[in-house]
Amino acid sequence: MNEEMELDQIIEKIEPIEKEWLEKAKQRTSQLVMPTRALGRIHDIGERLCAINKTLKPTVHRKAFLVMAGDHGVVEEGISAYPQVITGEMVRAFLNGGAGINILADQVNAEVWVVDMGIIAHVAPDSVANPERLLVHKMGQGTQNMAKGPAMSRKNAEAAVLTGFELAADLFKKGVEILGTGDMGIGNTTPSAAIGTVLTNHSIEQMVGRGTGVDDEGLMRKQKAIRRAIEVNQPDPHDGLDVLSKVGGFEIGGIAGCILAAASYHRPLVIDGFISTAGALIAHALCPAVTDYLFAGHCSEEPGHKRMLDHLQLNPILDLGMRLGEGTGGALAMGIIEGAARISRDMLTFEEAGVTEKDA
Amino acid sequence: MNEEMELDQIIEKIEPIEKEWLEKAKQRTSQLVMPTRALGRIHDIGERLCAINKTLKPTVHRKAFLVMAGDHGVVEEGISAYPQVITGEMVRAFLNGGAGINILADQVNAEVWVVDMGIIAHVAPDSVANPERLLVHKMGQGTQNMAKGPAMSRKNAEAAVLTGFELAADLFKKGVEILGTGDMGIGNTTPSAAIGTVLTNHSIEQMVGRGTGVDDEGLMRKQKAIRRAIEVNQPDPHDGLDVLSKVGGFEIGGIAGCILAAASYHRPLVIDGFISTAGALIAHALCPAVTDYLFAGHCSEEPGHKRMLDHLQLNPILDLGMRLGEGTGGALAMGIIEGAARISRDMLTFEEAGVTEKDA
């Protein structure tokens, strides 16, 4: 199998949503029993669901999260407040339940799948409560240190994207109607900020935040590591795979693949925070039309996040000062998106409800 | 029964939440398996639920909405884009299902109770699908025109508050763990803006918006009606009942009563948009401690709403450009509040999850 070709073929087939369906959905909204568009952005969300699914009765009953995990060689530059061992420990926690994403996904009745895209730890199936929810697609035991050279080969970058694509495609084929992306990987705000810097044209200072909570010196080290990674690797902003391979991460590539799958299968996808949005930047660099299929779950406390979302022209649904990742912001936003689907689908028109219209 | 005394007694017994419980809840949050307070405002919400209920395991399983409906004499000043007949028609729509609040309350599994606090229409029980959800407590067939004199007597203002109190208290006694307030009443952004002007010290221009969508001339009439209502009635900003009786509405009084009940029964209450928040301003004027028990579901498109919320020092959970009322913003926010309760209750600590802490 020629993977490069396959990715090209995937991208080639992706189309923007049809404006015609958007118009049909807007027409329907205008008839609903309330003042004109009185639910504001709820209508925008609902109408986009209609256009994505080519229906006026969108449903998002079956929901799932793919939580992509990876480790990062750049951690040796002292860019994280937490020890690297936590990546594997948190993967175990996700598989035992009781972490943030488990709790919030549970509330919206969403499945949580955890993908080992390349963490250092080996998670023994018998060491966790729900081993069937672990999908192992290790591209390596963490990436290489991007401050010294490419984080991964171009071949591996492509494989990471294709892995994410296939995992998400599998879920869509099984009937998942809305997918959320999540992430776990100590250090992964650093490659994400590097991707943001390269792809949005903002400065490193505008793009880098404290992640899980580095101190001032850690923040300096983080900025320095990103500066060196960009200098050493010279990623090409016009080539998404080049950026991913040089300053990305395995889980970020996996997230980009999920997004390509959503656009290919005409399903909505909810990105979470800074890392998921870095994945969206890669997917967008590969295929700009993907943003039609994306919902930004929330705006993270990480200062670069809003700038990334602006670049993608995505308006976050929630803004609650969250910065956990894992998919948690997406999970909370899925409740709002489901509300929007229900309004499109179930709300009566003036006529159906027997209510006098404005100009009657 | 001396109602004035009864209301005084209710107010006298209301206490702020205990800081001690807030501290205990914060302590628990600091142990949860994530970077410090990484879910941002979700923790603030969860901790307040803990303090309101005096528990570290808050639950909001059983949910309900009281949608308060009333008509408004001031409509004769030409202040609404919609004909007054719609109030009764929408009440029927709520009782048939299929209106915005039905759809969004359904999603969070919340009961919808509709209260006729004083609408013009008579809703015959056999004319709707769910007559058992209609609670008739008519204080009149709409208020008087506040531009010409008091909207209602002081006695009726008090009775409206006590009615809301008793209806909400009934639900709490039956096991409702979180209550949302909603409203219906053609013209009710006008008394709400008047209440906001009197109680927040903002100008009429800052407080008045287009409601369901009046044109420029309608907006001028609205401002003029409010100016006259304040001039004619001289409501006393230090006397919540005086403000309610002179420039309020029956449903707004009912909402204020619900809020007093939430504070009395130590239950969280979610206010919706402009009208619910006007009710909260009245409740706050009667008893400032009530805000400890309130969550602001969303920030409305109505420009005065944010100013009201600032006055109450409430930070809205959602900001989605909504302006429907009925409780719809509160219903969407209830999903977020439930998520916060689950995080407080169900998320594991570092120790329980077997994950290394930051300073390990």
Image (cartoon, coloured by chain):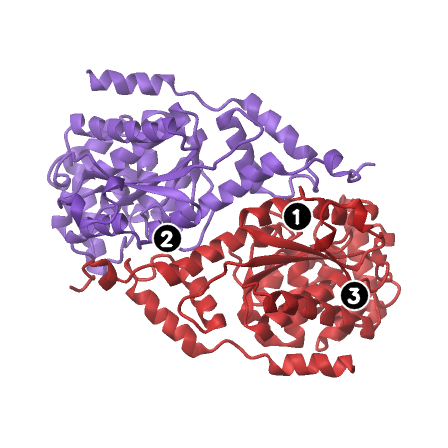
Chain colours: A red, B purple
Instruction: Pinpoint the chain carrying mark 2.
Output: B
Q: Nearer the viewer, mark 1 or mark 2?
A: 2
Q: Where is mark 3, residue-wise?
A: A247
Give the left or right position of residue B59, taking residue A237 as reference.
Answer: left
Q: Mark 3 or mark 1, which is nearer the start of the sequence?
A: 3
Does dot 2 land on a helix, a strand or a loop? helix
Depth order, front residue of A352/B332: A352
Give x and y (percent) for residue A189.
73, 55
State the image quarter where residue A64 is shown. Answer: bottom right
Q: Quadrant of the C terminus of chain A?
A: bottom left
Q: Are marks 2 and 3 in contact (CB under 8 Å)?
A: no
Measured in 3D between alpha carbons, the distance from the residue under mark 1 to the one under mark 2, in whole angstroms, is 31 Å
Number of residues whose C-alpha sits closer than 10 Å to that of mark 1, classed few (under 14), some (14–19) or many (20 or more):
many
Disc 3 crowd, CA 10 A, few/some/many (<14, 14-19, 20+)? many
Select label 1 or label 3 by which is in front.
Answer: 1
| Residue at 54% from the left image edge and 37% from the top image edge | B341
